Structure formats: structure tokens, C-alpha cells
Amino acid sequence: MKKVINVKNPHGSLNVKRVLILGLLLVTSISLAAESGKWESPENVEGTTTVSVEQAAELFNRGVPFLDVRNQRLFNRKHIPNAIHLDLKNGYSKEAMMGLFQPDQEVVIYCSGKKCSRSYRASTLAVHWGYTKIYYFRDGVIGWKTAGLPMTFADGTTRPATAKD
């Protein structure tokens, strides 16, 4: 029996396996750290502008679109008014982004807050896809709510959140 060798890269399948293993280890590490309660999303994402709650509110008042990348259940419960929803794990893709925003359009990306990795990951992907005006709102829903800014709730009302919300 002849042995077939890939002339371009005889170790190609090994490299793919290594990349998959490293990716799995990274995801596992992030998940474990997040579960321990000690993990926080990075303060900055290369290629984006990190914004505070006050800066996010200014962008909101200017009409810059907000993109909520949390899951559907959390989005339905409450979200920043007029936010567009694209669940990072179910529907967030380059094609979906291109259908909503131009690569040079300003967009604020947010999730639940500092303990959530979704806005960080979504912002990183958006930059990779060529988006040049991404605002990374690290404080997310928790920061927005804590500042007493308006939120849209499951019943369709929009009002400042309270401690019970």
C-alpha cells in the first residue's frame, strides 16, 4: 500500500488539530474564568473605541445605532431602546452585519456588562470584517440600567429601570 503525502504541507492535518485544540482550550478557559466570577471582559478591543456609559448615552442621543448581542431571552426582557438584536451565538455573522450596517457606519455594540464576553467578541469580529467605527460599550445593560437611563421592557414600555428590574 502506498502512503500518500500532502506535498504542500505534510503536517496539515496536525496543524488543523492543533488549532482546534488551542481554540477549545481558549473557549474552556474563558468559560471557567467567567463561571468563577473573576473574569472580566477586556477594557479595550483593538480597532474599536471603548465608551463609558456617559459616552454611550451621547451616542444614543445622536442616533447612533446600538447592537445588542445577548441571547433572545435577555433581549426580550429588557434592552436599550431601539437597539437591534443579533445574538452572538445565533445569527451574528458578517452577512448579517452587512445587511444592517455599512462598514464605515458608527455602531455601538453591547451585551450584559463587564462579566459578559459577547460584546468583546462581537466587536473583535466586526473589526476583522472591516468595520471601522465600532464603539465597544463594555458596561452594557448593567451600566446603562445603573445610570438610570431608559430601557425597553418585555411589555413594550420604555422607562428608566429600577432596582427591581
Image: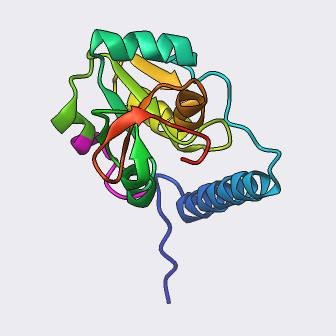
| Residue 140 in the image, given as x and y percentages of width and height | 54, 33
The residue stretch that appears in magenta: 89-96
Q: Would you say the magenta stretch is mainly helix, strand or loop?
A: loop
Image coordinates of residue 84 in percent, x first then y, are 28, 38
113 horizontally vs 88: left or right: right
Considering every residue shown, the one lying at the far bottom of the view is 1
User: How many numbered marks are there?
Assistant: 0
Q: Nearer the viewer, residue 18 or 155?
A: 155
- Identified at 33% across, 36% down, the residue is 158
Residue 146 sits above or below residue 4 on the image: above
Q: Is residue 36 above or below residue 38?
A: below
Residue, x 45% and y 19% (percent of image)?
135
**Is 69 a magenta residue?**
no
Q: Nearer the viewer, residue 165 or 124?
A: 165
Residue 130: image x %, image y %? 34, 24
Nearer-the-camera pick, 63 or 132? 63
